[in-house]
Amino acid sequence: MAVVLAVNPGSTTTKIGLFEDNRCLVKETLYHTVEETSPELPREDQAAFRRGAVMRFIKEKKISPENISAFVVRGGLLKPLKSGTYEVDNLLYQDLVTAKYGWHASNLGSMIALPLGRELGIPVYTVDPVTVDEFELPARYSGLKGLSRLSMSHALNMKAMARRAAALTGKTYDELNLVVVHLGSGISVSAHKKGKMVDVNNANEEGPFSLERCGTLPALGLARLCYSGRYGLDDMIRLLTSEAGIYSYLGTKDFKMVEKEVSKGDSKALEVVTAMAYQVAKEIGAMTAVLNGLVDGVVITGGMAHAKNLVGLIKEKTEYIAPVIILPGEEELEALAAGAFRVLSGEEESLKY
């Protein structure tokens, strides 16, 4: 019997789940105050605070630490990696602590768990971080020498849902070609060829616009905006990654509120949602071309996959390609635990960073 504690830190929350042999025993979302998650607070202090919250969770749920087989955490911004379950070692830990490849709240996962793992004498793993890179060579070309496309995506959830979709068809992930779409605050549309994610839009920089991100923009218009004198570099990054998309058109990042306005007959809200669905469908078409049209299924997942109107608009434009499989939600804790159990059971070997 193996028991795994999964930890997924977000900007203002830490999600925790306890799993026994792939069965969820308990999970909870811990909410943190603005002061506790302030960017001004040293990252080590943020990790220490959340580590204390994890320990309180263990104590409150009457979990015996000596019964935990491993910790598994969501991976942060790391170097490009192949898909799999990685042991969190000193090098991986230091790259996250120093933000060598950038900072994101998920960097805190290893910072929270590794000290606990060492204290208890158990391994700490991370599974399919956002920098999973299985690109084929043509996918790396951007069209401008010196500026390559980067593989950065919702790999953890998309890979997990691809495996689930394959199981629903009675086949394995390695047997199928799939287009997998993650609908969240950012939108990732990816091409999976026989178990490898060979292309995906970087949701921070390209592809469909989403709740708060711009997606692909007209290049010359963007250049003019950058040199308009209205924005510095940090202003532009904030504008493109957290103040764009639906937020820029409708002034909200709450898609449930957008849905409500659509249901009330708000023509502008419907127009924006239709445009977003249009762009998602167009990106699905692009990934279909990557797979030479040989697509066994289109999988739609993520939080916004619960939105029937949005999913219906996407499905309407893409169901001619292949069966559309809707797997709503973001089961990242379950995906983390599954990766750890594959290693603990001997199904896979853990990878070195």
Image: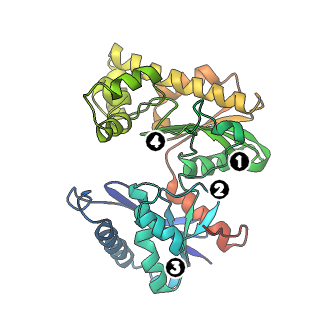
Q: Pointer 1 and pointer 3: residues touching (CB < 8 Å)?
A: no
Q: What crowding class fits label 3: few (fewer than 14 Cα within 10 Å), some (14-19), or many (20 or more)? A: some
Q: CA distance from mark 3 to mark 4?
A: 30 Å
Q: CA distance from mark 4 to mark 1?
A: 23 Å
State the residue at coordinates (35%, 13%): 267
Q: Is residue 50 above or below residue 263?
A: below
- Per the rendering, the mark at residue 303 is 4
Q: CA distance from mark 2 to mark 4?
A: 23 Å
Residue sitting farthest toward the front: 145
Q: Earlier in the sequence, mark 3 or mark 4?
A: 3
Q: Is residue 68 above or below residue 108?
A: below
At label 4, the amino acid type is Gly
Q: Earlier in the sequence, mark 2 or mark 3?
A: 3
Q: Is residue 53 above or below residue 150?
A: below
Q: Earlier in the sequence, mark 4 or mark 1?
A: 1
Say if residue 26 shows up in the picture. Answer: no
Q: CA distance from mark 2 to mark 1?
A: 8 Å
Quarter of the image with the C terminus in it: bottom right
Q: Nearer the viewer, residue 178 or 152?
A: 152
At label 1, the amino acid type is Lys
User: What residue is disc 3 on?
Assistant: 68
Of badges 2 and 4, the one in the foreground is 2
At label 3, the amino acid type is Ile
Q: Pointer 2 and pointer 1: residues touching (CB < 8 Å)?
A: yes
Expressed as whole percent of the image width and height from the top left, the position of residue 222 reads 40, 25
User: What residue is disc 2 on?
Assistant: 83
